[in-house]
Image (spheres, coloured by chain):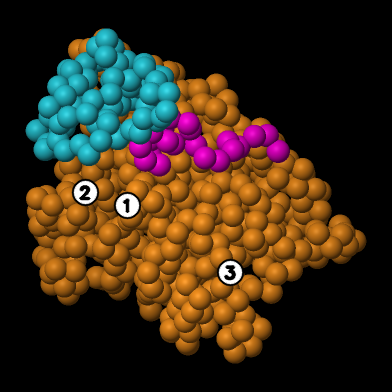
Chain colours: A cyan, B orange
Amino acid sequence: MTSPLQQKIKITGPSIVTANRTSDGAVIYRTAQQGWSVDLAKAAVVRTADAARALLAEAVADDLGAVGAYIAPVSIADDGAPTPGNLRERIRRNGVTIDLPVCA
Amino acid sequence: MYAYDEIDRAFLSERVSEFRDQVARRLSGELTEDEFKSLRLMNGVYLQLHAYMFRVAIPYGTLSSAQLRRLAAVARKYDRGYGHFTTRQNIQYNWIKLAELPDAMEELAEVGIHAIQTSGNCVRNITADQWSGVTPGEVDDPRIWAEVLRQYTTLHPEFSFLPRKFKIAITASDHDRAAIKIHDIGLKLKRNDEGRLGFEVLVGGGLGRTPFIGKTVNAFVPARDIVSYVEAVLRVYNQCGRRDNIYKARIKILVHELGAEAFARDVEAEWAQIRDSALVVDDDMVADIRSRFSYPDYQELPETPGELVRETDPHFRTWLHNSVAPHKEPGYAIVTLSLKPVGGAPGDATAEQMDAIADLADRYSFGEIRVGHEQNLALPNVAKRDLPALWRALDRIGVATPNVNLVSDIIACPGLDYCSLANARSIPVAQELTRRFADHDLAAMIGRLHINISGCINACGHHHVGHIGILGVEKNGEEFYQITIGGRADEGAVVGTLIGPAVRFTEVADVIEDIVEAYLALRARPDELFIDAVARLGVQPFKERVYATR
């Protein structure tokens, strides 16, 4: 399988790097402090392909902490915070769009 | 029920220990994700959008009450209190933590449940008619033969790295509830003119991006030869199946490209070399496996007990008509438990429901539960005199919706709410449709109508073979849905026909209502089923109705 770093990186707007936490699969975002956060607001936002490549390389290098790192688009809200750039990422951030089953 | 022996139990225990070590090495950093991925997949562990997903096999769809209680316990202890029954007689947990997985596996192994070969390019969980052994007219219990093949193909070194995954399904009934024609190998138990037991073998069925209906490659393989024949099929596939392109690696592509007759000739040539070898299924081995299936000690009971006659509640009569099927034994019935409540997620059951169903199975069904590919459960051995009491109990826990085989009995994959492969959501579409068709009188008037929904072209919701199929696709970041009609998954299996351009998420339910209204207006008589009306009329009148105002 082609490594994410070997794939051609093309971004069309502000982007972040996201993955799943190795221990429990939780959705996490790469921060500017070279760590991970479950809070999208703390994600490092990049705007060029080179910056995205560098952030992804750093994320992929943390094989112990995270699985399946990739670049995802975000929008920037009026307050400057990143928000998910597509439905998939909205669902990853906000959870399923349905009520979870509960006892009848 | 199949009873494990000491060898089986020791094997499962060792397997858990092995995986526990692998997980520990992964969490310590000794194993990279690249190294670990194939190991977790071979144990049914995927990584989905929000968490790890754990897929557990329910071989041939048979569960004991103790096993169902354990599935509930695992849901409660290690997940979020529910499980999702799939279209291949598995249950999936959506929120499992990697570090806790070995403990969950260990608890399942204690009752003979595992996740071996529920993923990976190997022979997957072998499925069977969920009414095996209890429905009238079978020539034999398909589960016996599913177990023969399960034992033979589990951890078989030659078949652990096939070009792609490989699915086998078995039925012994003329009406195919196991969807054998959309499996890599479909087996139909039968007797030949001399009365010998054997199988019609179909190969090359499958859905996904290139759907095919399986083709008969041998009209009768004697039962004694079924292992060698299946091995011959797998060998030809292993040797000739494509490994250069994941989208062309399933056996259906090989059968299609070679042609069924040429493929069958290759299999025959391979089979000739191994047929009279150690692979012959001897009678003692079959007898041993058969002896490990326990069958109820049925009583002689009246076909129409007074309890049944006296229960006049119209809701009960509706449920009785819809959800209760004939049993091979007089005075008994097969009861389907709908996991498709109005507004619910198809196939989901809470831990509380599973516990309650296990208790009801003990009380009313000799402790046995079945799981069908339609994502419903069944109690296979219910005395008819107990049906009124059972109905009340099932209704209290929300699994007595009388919609089996009706428009709201929807098969759906988890879709984009959970799945990392999906392009669009499936469950919310299903939920909206169940609300639109919640009126039972309307659903009964419509009659048998199967809706299948997949959130991507991988077709886990079997959309190609739904009477109405709904496929989620993504266009410019938005969810769209392609609609097919005329598909079916039974003995007359056929792939549905696309009716036109995809429609938006918000339009799907309206479109399905339009299709149903067109059917009601066009059917030749009230008992002409939707699928028969489409076969007679073609897609054009439905297409015209859907797109006339869109």
- Say the numbered circle drawn on residue B513: 3
Please indicate whether residue B33 sits to the left or right of residue B140 in the image. left
Residue at left 26%, top 63%? Answer: B210
* Label 1: which secondary element: loop
- Reply above or below: B353 against B166: above
Confirm whether the magenta stretch covers residue B549: no
Between discs 3 and 2, the one toward the N terminus: 2
Residue, disc 1: B476
- Say the numbered circle drawn on residue A83: none
| Residue B241 image position (x, y, % from top left) | 13, 56
Residue at left 51%, top 26%? Answer: B79
- Say the numbered circle drawn on residue B164: 2
Q: Quadrant of residue B153?
A: top left
Q: CA distance from mark 3 to mark 1?
A: 26 Å
| Residue B123 image position (x, y, % from top left) | 28, 46
Q: Amino acid at mark 2?
A: Arg
Query: How many neighbours does mark 1 have within 10 angstroms: few (below 14), some (14-19), or many (20 or more)?
Result: few
